[in-house]
Image (spheres, rainbow, N blue to C red):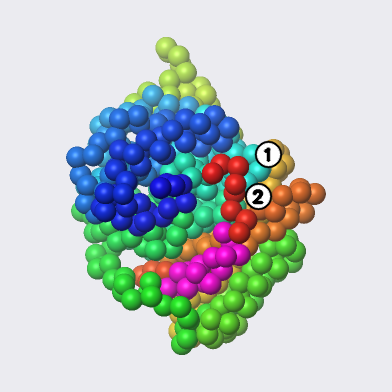
Amino acid sequence: MEISGLSLKELASAIQSGTLSKDEVYRHFFNRIQQYNGTLEAFNSVNETPDFSHEWPFCGLPIGVKDVFCEKGISTTASSHMLENFVPPYESTVTERLKQAGMVSIGKLNLDEYAMGWSGENSALRITKNPWDISRIPGGSSSGSAAAVAAWLVPAALGTDTGGSIRQPASMCGVVGFKPTYGRNSRFGVIAMASSLDTPGTFTRTVEDAAWLYETMAWKDAHDATSLDHPVTIDPSIWNRTDLTWVRIGIPKEYFIDGIEAGVRKEIDASIDALRSLGAEIIEVSLPHTEYGLAVYYIVMPAEVSTNLARYDGIRFGHIEGVGSDITKNRTGGFGKEAQRRIMLGSFVLSSGFYDAYYKKATGVRELIRDDFKKAFESVDVIVTPTAPSVAWKIGEKTDDPLKMYLSDIFTVNGSLAWLPGLTVPVGYALPEDGGENELPVGLQILGPTLGEEKCFLVGHVLEQAMKSKVQAKQQKSFL
């Protein structure tokens, strides 16, 4: 039986029936990592010996873990020199719940340092490559997670999404990326970047697999004051739906702007036509404060970064430049340029005389953005948008211009600011506008109302099935 290409649910069914053994499945993916990780550089470390002490319901299936989730006794680096020798004495809630349900951590996945980035190029350890074209970025910050699932190095992976760090790389690597409502998945044991935004989520091959993991991960956690006490209610009948009759889908006029690559726009328009043909009612909506999202995000996020990263001084915790070195040397040597940039920006907007002018004003506009979505969801069930304005770009193409990088989050940050669930589904392929000869994946973003994960899964699953032949016809071959 060919293991690569099977979904989590299909792999679990094969193990339960005796067609495959859990050790056979684990060794298959372990061997693929050994074979291809030297090229892709998706993993920071790999676990050679699996722990099969728990088996139900995930049957010992392997999962890749973004290197910001603490795993007891396993090196967790956040892809930073500051933490390259850190071995956590405790387990994150998310990984603990998945392991208790039978999943096995197969290794830690590369990311932009402390999850600060859009491309994977900000990692202090390695630059992950896009499996569709290894001269290109896989997206970030969950770069290793997206690339590993896309290349079948692992059937699923954990990521975190602060402003698009699951959805954007999922789009660029052609896999399903899911970020639940803020607070649905515990942040305990996840190395913090921006505490009012960080959201653990997943990369999978199918929407149904994303929902399956979500049902285990979502939980009220006493260790995380922001985690929500709300039952997970995924109606299993949605997996039998083949149409979207009576589903109202909003198209925000502010998201269809100049600057979207022509090929991306063509695929997004085609996917909206497909939703219409499936019976959905397509309704134009307005999110009038959309234009302020990036500015708000790049004030709120760095402010929280500067606070969270203050603890890493190299004296009490983290990288030490040398015996007798001071805090400045430790932090300069321990943090990369992007981390330093965000720390300085955050410290500035929180400083005396600037707090009211920047941070306080930004938090007020954030509420206006949230109100825009609340009003829109009064008339629609979900909102669909492009996930990213472009396909994956060349490694090194934008590293000298961080503002160009920031614009890659233009369609994802507002959903994060509003704490909404978001799902990215592959819908097609487009040629890059830089002259590249290979078509690259394009993803459609589906945003739901607060705690509206089931609505995202329904729309995503029906669209996924309808576009299956189109998407799978061009699946990456060189890594299969």
Query: Quick one: label 2, few (<14), some, or many (20+) residues within 10 Å?
Result: many
Q: Say which residue appears at 35% left-offset and 52% top-offset.
A: 11
- Residue 392's label in the rendered image is 2
257 vs 211, nearest the viewer: 211
Counting every numbered tag in the picture gives 2
Principal secondary structure, stretch drawn in magenta: helix
Horizontal and vertical percent position of residue 223? 23, 50
**Residue found at the very far top of the displayed protein:** 323
Kind of residue sitting beneath label 2: Ala
Who's the residue at 70% across and 43% down the image? 394
Q: Nearer the viewer, residue 2 or 371?
A: 2
Q: Position of residue 148 (x, y in %)?
A: 49, 43
Q: Range of the magenta residues?
A: 458-472
Q: Residue at x 66, y 43 (%)?
A: 133
Check disc 1: other Cα within 10 Å, few if <14, some if 14-19, many if 20+.
Answer: some
Relative image position of residue 178 (x, y in whole percent): 44, 59
Q: Inspect this view and state whether residue 478 appears.
A: yes
Q: Residue at x 38, y 59 (%)?
A: 209
| The label number, if any, that marks residue 410 in the structure image | none
Residue 455, image quadrant = bottom left
Q: Position of residue 172 (x, y in %)?
A: 60, 52
